[in-house]
Amino acid sequence: MSLGRGLLSSGPRGATTKILAFGSLFIFLATVYTLFPSTPKKAWATLSSPFSSRVRGQCPPEAYADGKWVHQAPPAPNVTMTSMDDALPIVGFEGCASSREYYWHLASDRPEQWDRFPGVASWRWDPSSECEGLRPLDPEALVQDLVENGGWLLIGDSVTENHFFSLSCILYPHVIATPNYTDLPFYERHWPQNLYLSPSSPLVEYLNPPVGFNISTTPLVTFRRVDVMLSREQLVDLHHDLYDPPLGVNLFSEEAFWSLPPSQYLSIFQKPLPAANYRTMVVSTAGHWTTTLMAGFHDEAAEGGGIRRILGFFRHAMTKWADEIQAAMSRDTGTAGGRRTREVVEVVSSRSYPNIHFLGIDRPGMLRPDAHSTGDCLHIMSGAGVLEGWTHYIWHYITRELPGRIR
Ligand SMILES: *[C@@H]1O[C@H](CO)[C@@H](O)[C@H](O)[C@H]1NC(C)=O
Ligand SMILES: *[C@@H]1O[C@H](CO)[C@@H](O)[C@H](O)[C@H]1NC(C)=O
Ligand SMILES: *[C@@H]1O[C@H](CO)[C@@H](O)[C@H](O)[C@H]1NC(C)=O
């Protein structure tokens, strides 16, 4: 058993810090329609628009999440699945920059599940009527923001990696991804993955990058695998301090996981140009807070095998995490992110964490059991609208909701 999923995000430096926690599905088709940029001329028109229309949004995360999926014609209704690549046009992608587990992310790796297409690409998220002014997802304008206003650092587990892959499709062909996994027989899950502005993107000549930006070294998006937000040692110490466990009771089992201490990903977040120019940290955790990994809480007789106790521990851990992130942000006037469980909401909604914003937008995803990957029900495929909805709402939130609050 594990906790529910949510995401945290942190916002622009020099402005209010934000934590965005999300975990939702969304309107993929709206995304799809704007995916194909076409000519530089059109790109130019699109690129100039964000500045003329910088209006304050009125679509808080709750209003966004309180909507419904509406059926709609898929982007390519007449394409049928005859190869794994056919999934791309069916969901409305021209391609994906990332080469990591490509067809697994597209959920086209198992022919026996091809009958999911095009149905899985036939839904659009319709937020509640309380959501006004939701900015349509415009990949070119998103590229512009990532270059000119700063990149996103994605911190989380394999579901955040799913989100990274989806971003590499939304932003294709304007970005290139590293590492190139094509010929790698072996890789480590903790390797950083990056999206860079592609030198061959037609947008390049229209962008105004900050001084010091280097197209080959300044990532627009980076994913770092951090399963439980704090390091193993930090969690072991916290467990010890809180519960004084008897000798021989260890918090962690032998199960593998990946983590970094916040100090380490904060130092990545705060790296100056040309190494980086991040403005938003998007943080998510959930799937590894389990009674199998955290076997010290396992109790067969208890509800959920001990998951309640893990929730209690999670609250303490997230408070410690938010304190550490906010302290760093306050020094740097940066931002941080949050998670969808009640514990996270309570922790990060507190006024003590002005730079951490919780985005409870996981509901759309919960309503889309068809959007899981082919091998399990934990991971989320790219192209169904769920992961693309996270990108859409986070981008809207950063560019439309937060500016109204920042003074
Ligand atoms: C798809 O097929 C339908 C029915 O066969 C046809 O009416 C429609 O024009 C086709 N659409 C495209 C885009 O080819
Ligand atoms: C990745 O590597 C493969 C195999 O070496 C190569 O064909 C491909 O062009 C590379 N992709 C990129 C984006 O460089
Ligand atoms: C960008 O970085 C690369 C790799 O470090 C370097 O070779 C190149 O000179 C840099 N470009 C500029 C304009 O500084």
Image: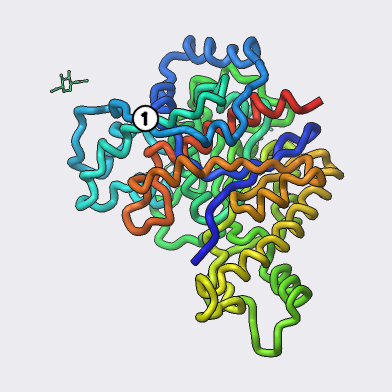
**Up/down of 138 relative to 349, above or below:** above
- Please state the horizontal and vertical placement of residue 365, each as a whole percent of the image: 45, 44
The answer to whether any part of residue 275 appears in the image is: no
- Please state the horizontal and vertical placement of residue 168, each as a whole percent of the image: 47, 38
Q: Could you classify mark 1 by the number of other residues whose Cα lies within 10 Å: few (under 14), some (14-19), or many (20 or more)?
A: few
* Left or right placement of residue 106 versus residue 254 in this view: left
The answer to whether any part of residue 341 appears in the image is: yes
**Up/down of 243 relative to 371, above or below:** below
Q: Check disc 1 and report the residue beneath it.
A: 70
Q: Is mark 1 within 8 Å of ligand 1?
A: no
Nearest the viewer among 162 and 4 is 4
Nearest the viewer among 265 and 303 is 303
- Please state the horizontal and vertical placement of residue 13, each as a whole percent of the image: 77, 36
Nearest the viewer among 308 and 260 is 308
Question: Which residue does the image show at 36% across and 48% down from the upper left?
Answer: 369
Q: Residue furthest bottom?
A: 247
Question: Which residue does the image show at 72% across and 52% down from the upper left?
Answer: 347
The kind of residue tagged 1 is Val
Nearest the viewer among 403 and 272 is 403
Quadrant hosting residue 237: bottom right
Give ligand 3's quarter of the image: top right
Question: Which residue does the image show at 59% across and 31% down from the upper left?
Answer: 395
Tell me the quadrant of the picture where the C terminus can be found. top right
Question: Which residue does the image show at 55% across and 80% down from the upper left?
Answer: 299
Q: Secondary structure at mark 1?
A: strand
**Up/down of 126 relative to 229, above or below:** above
* Left or right placement of residue 214 versus residue 194 in this view: right
* Left or right placement of residue 208 versus residue 192 in this view: right
Q: Which coloring applies here? A: rainbow
Quadrant hosting residue 49: top right
- Please state the horizontal and vertical placement of residue 65, each as a whole percent of the image: 52, 36
* Left or right placement of residue 349 versus residue 290 in this view: right
